[in-house]
Amino acid sequence: MIYIFLAEGFEETEAIATADVIIRGGLEVKLVSIMDSKTVTGSHGISIQADIMFDESDYNDAEVLVLPGGMPGTTNLAKYDRLIALLKKQHDEGKKIAAICAAPMVFGTNGLLEGKKAVCFPGFEEYLKGADVQQVKALTDGNVTTGRGPGAAIDFGLEIVRILQGEDRADEVAKSMVYR
């Protein structure tokens, strides 16, 4: 199961395009609200209905925990202590975590990027504490996947498919979307 966490002000393209690409890859996705309602409004005013509330899973089946960026979505994610504890546990156990746009700052400010190559939305590099900042659309270093921004959401989703199902499956998904 891939869990994508939504907070008020999330970047809609990053959440939905990522989820769509992963689902096209044959994987299961759950959108998770960390707010007081399953309906979460993105940074551009588009409201999305999450599948579950944060407390409705123990996340033991998590293949990847995913954070979309956007503002103030990223800062809302960063303030949610139970999510931070879950991310740290997942990372410490060597399990996969992923973030795109501004959201890699949540990893950086919590020590989860130390010694890793990572990318983020231009201007957020200072928050990637301990990371070797790259300039590509999406990449994985160890158990951490990061993406640059809304324009890289498909690449980010394909990278998640690649790390879970291999390069051939990611290429098939890209071709089926007329992306490559």
Image: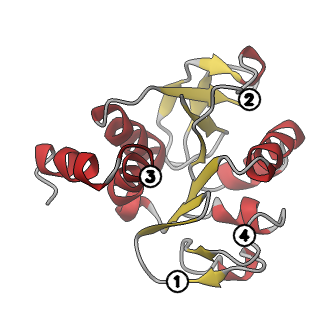
Q: Is residue 24 left or right of residue 130?
A: left
Query: Disc 2 or disc 3, which is closer to the eye?
Result: 3
Q: Is residue 157 left or right of residue 114?
A: left
Spatial distance from mark 1 to mark 3, Cα to Cα? 19 Å
Query: Disc 2 or disc 1, which is closer to the eye?
Result: 1
Give the residue type at disc 4. Answer: Leu
Spatial distance from mark 4 to mark 1, Cα to Cα? 13 Å
Mark sitting earlier along the chain (4/1) = 4
Give the residue type at disc 3. Answer: Ile
Residue under label 2, please give it. Answer: 35
Mark sitting earlier along the chain (3/4) = 4
Residue under label 4, please give it. Answer: 113
> Dot 3: few (<14), some (14–19), or many (≥20) neighbours within 10 Å?
some
Mark sitting earlier along the chain (4/2) = 2
Residue at x-position 42% and y-position 59%:
150
Residue at x-position 70% and y-position 27%:
59
Instruction: Identify the element where label 3 is drawn.
Output: helix
Mark sitting earlier along the chain (2/3) = 2
Instruction: Identify the element where label 1 is drawn.
Output: loop
Query: Disc 4 or disc 2, which is closer to the eye?
Result: 4
Spatial distance from mark 2 to mark 1, Cα to Cα? 32 Å
Q: Position of residue 132 (x, y in %)?
A: 64, 84
Give the residue type at disc 1. Answer: Gln
Mark sitting earlier along the chain (1/3) = 1
